[in-house]
Image: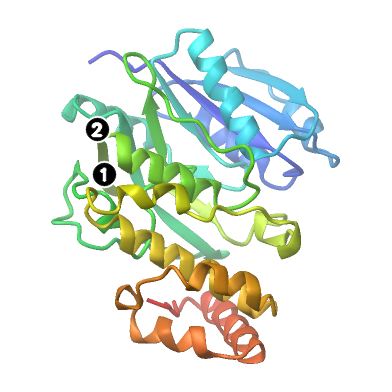
Amino acid sequence: MSNPNILVIIPVYNKQATIERAINSVLEQTVSCDLLVINDGSTDYSASVIEKFNNPRLSYTSQLNHGVSFTRNRGIKTALKNGYEYIAFLDADDYWLDNHIEQIEQLIEKFPEASVFANNYHLKIGESRWNRTKFSNLKDQESQIVKPFFKANYLNSILSSSSYCMRLIGNDPIYYNEELTHTEDTDFLIKVGLTKTVAFNNKATVIIDKQADNRSDAVHILKRTVTNFDCYEEKYGAVEGLKKYLDINRFSIAVNYRMHGLIERAVFYQRKIDLDHLSCKQLQLLKMSRLQLKALHKTKKILEVIGLDLRTG
């Protein structure tokens, strides 16, 4: 097949330390694609780093700070306006191996019935340490249509914001919820799972840098806006695995609120969870005190640095 007509979007907010790496990883792909970098009101030297690039496939624009969802949606609208067939995203913290788009292209060719295509990813937790990403209920290691979709997302998300490509031509694109400051990726994944066919390649071509500065978890919890998932309740009966997937995410939000002493907010999410959907470890976490949770969170960070993964599921 001829090379897919793909526009890659990198949203940037105060990423002077990592944006060069991200841009280079796109421009050095074995399959060429166009790149639009959108500076979302950075106050550091990100703009200076970006402006050093001189490549005909790279476009650059700046805007006042509107948040990542607004920025990604602007990218989708730009791609549609300029006739691109596909759009892909890369967070400025993260980077691609040079065969990422090549592998996406193979998915597009192999699964023409799909409209969202994703490669696996590794989580970078140290200078030379990566966590292998595992998924629930995948039948095998071969590229495949993910079905039922939500049952594959219990451990980790099939879609990372840096790992997927979405068809635009002949497909109703999905937009991000601009009201959310956090969990916007989870909300996006739910919309994909409810309306799209997803093709997945288990070969990792993306590195998610968990050590990068200024990730969204640095935002104070009282300043975060997260989804409550209520708008998806009517879909429970018809969509296999959806209720459990939402309950696992409700659990994560509830534990985070409990760790910060925000019990009323935690209870708002806990009361809608079917406890049969949680593991024994997860049930124990919901009973822990704030101090116990904070101590465990610190331990988890230490274990990640030395390459051990303390799962809550």
Residue farthest to the top? 82
Q: Quadrant of the N terminus?
A: top left
- Tell me if mark 2 has few (under 14), some (14-19) or many (20+) residues whose alpha carbon lies within 10 angstroms of its own: many
Count residues near mark 1 (Cα–Cα under 10 Å), then give few for <14, some for 14-19, many for 20+. Answer: many
Q: Which residue is mark 1?
A: 201
The tag on residue 107 is: 2
Colour style of the rendered protein structure = rainbow
Asked whether residue 220 is in view, the answer is no
In what quadrant of the picture does the C terminus appear? bottom left
Left of 217 or right of it: where is 288? left
Alpha-carbon distance for marks 1 and 2?
7 Å
Q: Residue at image x 42%, y 81%?
A: 282
Please tell me whether mark 2 sits on a helix, a strand or a loop. helix
Instruction: Say whether disc 1 or disc 2 marks the residue closer to the N-terminus.
Output: 2
The image position of residue 18, as x and y in percent, is 67, 46
Which quarter of the picture shows residue 152? bottom left
Left or right, 139 with reference to 282: left
Q: Which x, y percent locates residue 91?
A: 57, 42
Q: Is residue 264 above or below residue 127?
A: below
Label number found at residue 103: none
Tell me: residue 158, above or below residue 85. below
Give the residue displayed 29% in from the left and 53% down from the top. Answer: 236
Q: Amino acid at mark 2?
A: Leu
In the rendered image, the residue lying farthest to the left is 139
Residue 207 location (% of width, % of height): 48, 51
Snapshot quadrant of residue 302: bottom right
Amino acid type at circle 1 is Asn
In percent of width and height, residue 227 lies at 55, 52
Q: Identify the residue shown where x is 57% and y is 60%.
A: 210
